[in-house]
Image (cartoon, rainbow, N blue to C red):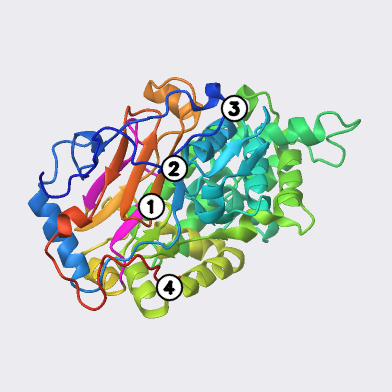
Amino acid sequence: MASGQARYENPGEFPRGLLRYRGAPSLIQGLPTTVEPWVPGGRNAQARGGSSPAVVSRLLRRAVSHRPWRWPERPVYFISDPHADAEAFVGSLVASGGVKQTGAGLDEITLTKRGRKGTFVIGGDCLDKGPSNLTLLRSLRRLMDSGARVTLLAGNHDMRLLMGLMALEHARSPRTEHLFVRMGNKAISLFKEVYAEYLEGQAAPLAGVPGRKGCRRRLFPGDDWFEAFPEMARGRLSDRAIDKELTRLRKKVASFESSCEKAGLTLRQVYAAAMRLRELFLRPEGEFAWFFEAMQLAHRDGSFLFVHAGLDDSIAALIESEGIEALNQRFAELVVEDPFAFYYGPLANTLRTKYRKVDFPLTERGVDGAYREGIHAVVHGHINLTAGQRLMIRRGMLHIEGDITLDRNSRRKEGLAGHGMGVTIIHPTGRVIGISNDYPHAKVFEPAGYLAGHRAPGRSASKHKAGRS
């Protein structure tokens, strides 16, 4: 059998006792019941061509030449980018084998024995697009209240909401006054849900709300913003980045109000919903105050770094010098103290990079820094896929891509039916497992096959111990 392939006594069948879906048949229909080896960059990775076993072996051996490969002590269930599709989110929890659905409601879920032993990492972008922002948040809260170990990562769509609400908290300034409209059309579904649930039935839902022009002055950047922003941002952002931001904002300013009206909301109703969102998310007594309070920028377990989008040299250096806890502390402080510095700086690159020229770079220096710290793979979402998870080598480092297009609005655009379901499992037995209802088999990646015969420094790579977080 070639290096890197999965080894099973009965090829094609699930390894005994590894998984069991426990939900309504209508919910779990389409989830795979067979397995196949998962090859980085290969056919089942949804990429052109593949990476030869020799290339993957060389890369992984380079990683473990610094520190041995370490697996989490508990199974990790990674679910990313549900984008306000609560049914897809709950279906993905059930697909993990760590949750069973006990009734028809999407909050009627309990942990299984596997779930009690594991960790759920939610990879960001819980919000926007729809159709069920609020129901998804309540299902997530139910998971947290069930006693599950849950780590919630920041996604770019989640942070756009926070930045937009923070803009209404801060005095108007070229640094922040554009951040509400910058959320764009994808956030409108949340405003519509909030207005319908919390305001529509009231006797005077718009009492105290300014007129249309007054709402526009409070929500939109001022007429002088397009001159003031470049002056303020110069020296902090490149000219190319500034020009791109101005172009983006012109489009969003031009379309935001008409998009709201198309969705059935006046600008006054949007303003009223925004005020209620501030109460729900930013006030200690708010129903969803826990959401941003619980959020982290990054999570580390064993040799795996979990972020929403990716890594760059500056973040790799910070992790190597100070650790994940310090990175998350900087994140928590900066989003409150200086939203501009956060949103346009390297911290936010971890939740929006696609390794483009406009993104902060990940080079060999950053990869080697991550390897010295014992981080051998990045697990992330953000890049939506249509045939399940993907293994890719980016900038000389293994990336496990877990955004499998869960929400039905995105799926409709991609030509996919219904809602998605799936989970990426990092298992202490030395397996990475990709499960999706858009691919007929569970994909199983076993790095040990590529490292056979290689002895890492220090402890044996076969010991499954978690790295520091």
At mark 4, the secondary structure is: loop
For the residues carrying marks 4 and 3, which lies nearer the camera in this image? 4
Does label 2 or label 3 sit earlier along the sequence? 2
* Closer-to-camera residue (143/246): 143
At mark 1, the secondary structure is: strand
The total number of labels drawn is 4
Left or right of 250, for residue 24: right
According to the image, label 3 marks what residue? 258
Q: Amino acid at mark 4?
A: Arg
Whether pointer 3 and pointer 1 mark residues with C-beta atoms closer than 8 Å, the reply is no
Give the number of the disc on residue 426: 1
Q: Is residue 379 magenta?
A: yes
Q: Is residue 100 magenta?
A: no
Sort mark 3 into few (<14), some (14-19) or many (20+) by Cα contacts within 10 Å: some
Give the number of the disc on residue 468: 4
At mark 2, the secondary structure is: helix
Q: Which residues are magenta?
A: 374-393
Give the number of the disc on residue 248: 2
Does label 1 or label 4 sit earlier along the sequence? 1
For the residues carrying marks 4 and 2, which lies nearer the camera in this image? 4
Q: Residue 327 location in percent, x, y?
A: 46, 70
Whether pointer 2 and pointer 3 mark residues with C-beta atoms closer than 8 Å, the reply is no
Measured Cα–Cα span from mark 3 to mark 1: 44 Å
At mark 3, the secondary structure is: helix
Sort mark 4 into few (<14), some (14-19) or many (20+) by Cα contacts within 10 Å: some
Does label 2 or label 1 sit earlier along the sequence? 2
Measured Cα–Cα span from mark 4 to mark 2: 40 Å
For the residues carrying marks 3 and 1, which lies nearer the camera in this image? 1
